[in-house]
Image (spheres, rainbow, N blue to C red):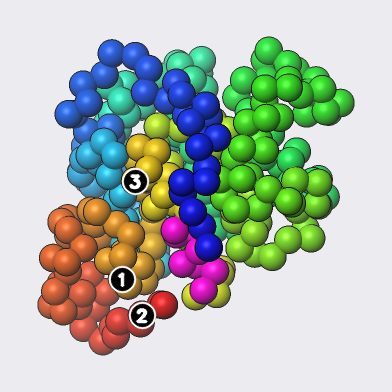
Amino acid sequence: MFNPRSHASWKFLAADSNSGLVDETSPILSINGVEKVYPNGTRALKGVSFDVPRGSFVAVIGLSGSGKSTMLRCINRIHEPTAGSILFDGQEMTTLSPKELRHARQQIGMVFQHFNLIKRRDVLTNVLSGKLGQMAEFPFGGIFKRWPKEWIEEAHAALKLVGIPDKALVRADGLSGGQQQRVAIARTLMQKPKLLLADEPVASLDPSTSNSVMQYLKILNEKHGVTVVCNLHFLSLVREYATHVVALRGGEKVFEGKPLDITPQWFKDIYGEQAKEVEIH
């Protein structure tokens, strides 16, 4: 069982995450009229706008193909928005120079559905790869494992935080799916992110493991102040873990509110008249 009180070592990981003169009452993220049109003409996003309150846990819901993944990838410019603006912590993401974008991305963690680990490398190396944004200072660390001592200490602390401190020297492909997702979360923590984007982080996991992974995201949000934007399918998870909800359908925002505001009629508006809710426990 996860016990957040046993993970005081996280404190030094996040020590500088809120440095700088920032209005703590302002949204950490503002999406304004964002559109995305792919080269084949597909309009994945159609003028989407919403704010993400600082310290919140926002769930983005909707059918497959509704634009959820595109939305997350536009936030950190993995995909370039066609129109609109994305304001992150006072910076307009769509106009940043390459150097400015690299710095901004260091503050935005990303967790994917399929983990994106280096399967043949050990867990510790995978976690340390979260420091790649700072590798200009230590350009050969990833190749020759000449990692700074303090980074190695941070990596072990991150693994302790997600409950797998004993897996540091195990190859990533020797772990279960839930353990691999925990490694992915620990890797993201090495960035000391202000904002964590999670794209269907439990879609490929069984129900029990899904709740375990979601619990770690919740602890990072509630205990350590990391704002989370998470794409999810199951409303039972949304109601348990999220503070705010945004729903997309066909690339458009069709709902914004609190989890308990999603009535049976709103569910049908979001997912279609024939949809039935499936709970995950």
Query: Between disc 2 and disc 3, whose residue precedes?
Result: 3
How many numbered discs, if any?
Answer: 3
* Quadrant the C terminus occupies: bottom left
Q: Residue furthest right?
A: 144
Q: Residue at x 52, y 46 (%)?
A: 6
Label 3 sits on residue: 222
Q: Which quadrant would residue 273 be assigned to in this image?
A: bottom left
Q: Quadrant of residue 194?
A: top left
276 up-or-down from 237: above or below: below
Give the mark nearer the N terminus: 3 vs 1. 3
Q: How far across and down, in percent of the image, does residue 209 sit?
A: 54, 69
Left or right for 203, reference 184? left
Q: Which residue is mark 1?
A: 235
Q: Is residue 245 above or below residue 152?
A: below
Residue stretch in magenta: 208-215
In depth, the one of 103 and 226 nearer the eye is: 226
Read off the residue under disc 2: 279
Of the numbered discs 2 and 1, the one sitting upstream in the chain is 1
Image point (80%, 52%), residue name: 170
Residue 226 horizontal side relative to residue 268, left or right: right
Residue 236, horizontal then vertical, whole percent: 32, 72
Residue 209 seen anywhere in this rendered image of the structure:
yes
